[in-house]
Image (tube, helix red, strand yellow):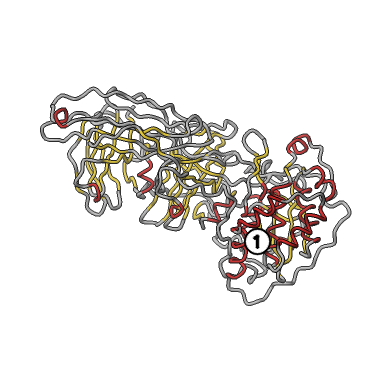
Amino acid sequence: MVGDPNLKARTENYSTLVIPPSATKNEQLESGYGSTNSASDDSSGCRRTNIAKSRKQPRHTSIPMVDINRSKNVLHGTYQCDSTECNNTKQQQLQPFNLDPINNYHRLKTANSQISIDATPFQKFIPNNKIYNNGNSKKLCSKPTNTSTEHSRKLHTPVKKDNDIVNYSDDWDSDYSDDWESEVDEKPKITTAIKLPSTEPKIPDNSLNLIPSDPTAFEASFCRKRQAAIDNMSYRQAVDSWKAKGLHDVAKLINELSSGKNLIDRAWIVFYWVSQNIEYDVEAYFSGNIHHQTAADIFASRKGVCDAFGTIFETLCTAVQIECKKISGYAKGYSFKMGQKSFTRTNHAWNVLRLEGHWYLVDSTWGAGHLDSNNQNQKELNSFYFLVPPEQMIYRHLPEDSQWQLLISSISMDDFIHMPYVHPAFFEHNLDIVSPRHSNTAFFNLNHGLSEVLVRAPSDVTLMGDIKESGSGKIETSSLIQYDTDRQLWQCLFAPKRSGSHTLTIFTRREIETIKSKNTENKYSCAIEFSLHVPSDVVKIKPFPLTYGLYTQCKCQIFEPLDGALKPGSKTTIHCRIPNAYCARLQLDGEWLSEEILKDGIFKRQITIPQREIIMWVKFPDKKNTSNYNGLFHYSIK
């Protein structure tokens, strides 16, 4: 089956730059600005984050839209004003900047929205740390579980059948939601304060008991050895230099390189060699011309589908004295559709190997790369699939022989089909789905016209999301991802524009990995996907306000109004939480209201809705003696 790509996410797809008008006698003009928005990363299986609509802008304001597909860098505009001009009571006519909106699900770059009296020239913001491209995975150690029975070493090796794994209808993990890249030095995105009364079916939290049958397999010492092997660059350099003429040569070189090392290092060298030397046979997969190959055939052609990867991995492990077996089963990869009832046949092959008396799971096919949006093989090392904890592997891999689930209580096909559709980043960033629990289908709330997904994450992890209509591949702009401080979790809101089937995608990034440099990449990785069905009788959905990158970074929260479609001339209250902010200031159709000093980060002010737009600007303590403001969110009036 097509292996799981390390999906990367994008950040918000819109950069809005706003230039303040000339100051009146009682207000000081802010003259320069740069802008940022939040975005997600490209996807296949997972598409990217939210893209806001392109809006017609007034002459004095420019709201550039960042195109994830077209531009590798986001330009920041600056408007310069000297002190004489700033004191002029006439408003200056400002030059609008125009960046094309982005509708691609590939990569999106962003920058920080800022308005400042200290004008600076145009500049590029370059993405932060690339998180997963180097194939280094985070620690996958399972949390200790309280079990009174020792279950290790109790598995019986199944008898190998003559016709072991020949035809696979699904051999890869797809990259359709995978690659959104953010070019901003920004943090997570946070939002709402409403609590949707859910009428979704109540499923007990303990409905799935994913407890490993061997509680000591992933002890701390093992996890350290595993990670040390993965991080050992000398292994990779040595393997990359090999010029083996046959499998016997490869086995000899592996034994020499791992001499004096533990079996975990040796197993990793086998995994790495396979990932770098065997290519997924895309042509055979799509043509259906799949046949069993011997290890020698695979070495000669250097191509194959999952059966070939499993065969050569088993052969090399056996040659270097590691007990290993190839197993078949069902996998949620390229051909899997959320909502399908079952599998017609097995569609994938992977391996189990025994190290230090414990059995471990390995998928060298998915560890070697993935299928991109053009159905082309993309080689990309993904070490997540090397020695995977069984309670994580089971989300995407269901062995035909239930004993190889390596769980105390095996799950059924029905359980497997309905489990959340998650990617490696979900486990690497320690996410927990609060709602919908144990399901890959999100619930649509008819009363609010929204779907809500709740996710708990560590304090240094941030989320983003997007929604797309199933089949169209077009990312919609109707999602709002924000941090609910009261409940201490992320609230992911989605408002599809029309009825029918949709796919919701949530991306994640660990902020501790973000290097504060404008010359490094800053990526979100695809973590979770949900299907969503919207009934045909749903009225037109109203949009959310557009939020900028800083909104996510600072874990801000909009209490009201969440409805982005406001009526000109009517009254509304802008109520939000901006943690650690010194003051905030609203801009209505280019006119600046007075600055408000915040207490406990809370802003609340009643206004008359203008004709075109409302923008929230904010200042933090380190900037309180300057005239620099950062853009937080934006309402477009229609």
Residue extending farthest to the bottom is: 148
Q: Residue at x 43, y 26 (%)?
A: 100
In this view, the residue farthest toward the left is 25
Residue 102 screen position, x and y as percent: 47, 30
Would you say residue 570 is visible in this rendering? no
At horizontal 70% and vertical 63% (from top left) the residue drawn is: 258
Is 311 placed left or right of 190 in the picture? right
Q: Residues within 10 Å of mark 1 (few under 14, many from 20)?
A: many
Q: Write down the residue under mark 1.
A: 390
Q: Nearer the viewer, residue 159 or 19?
A: 19
Q: Quadrant of the C terminus?
A: top left
215 sits left or right of 491 in the view: right
Quadrant where the N terminus is found in the figure? top right
Q: Nearer the viewer, residue 503 or 123?
A: 123
Rendered location of residue 425, percent (x, y):
55, 52
Q: Amino acid at mark 1?
A: Pro
Please say whether residue 208 is visible from this viewpoint. Answer: yes
Q: Is residue 629 above or below residue 566?
A: below
**What is the x, y in percent for residue 113?**
33, 38
| Residue 178 point in image, percent of width and height | 57, 42
Label 1: element kind: helix
Closer to us: 263 or 415: 263
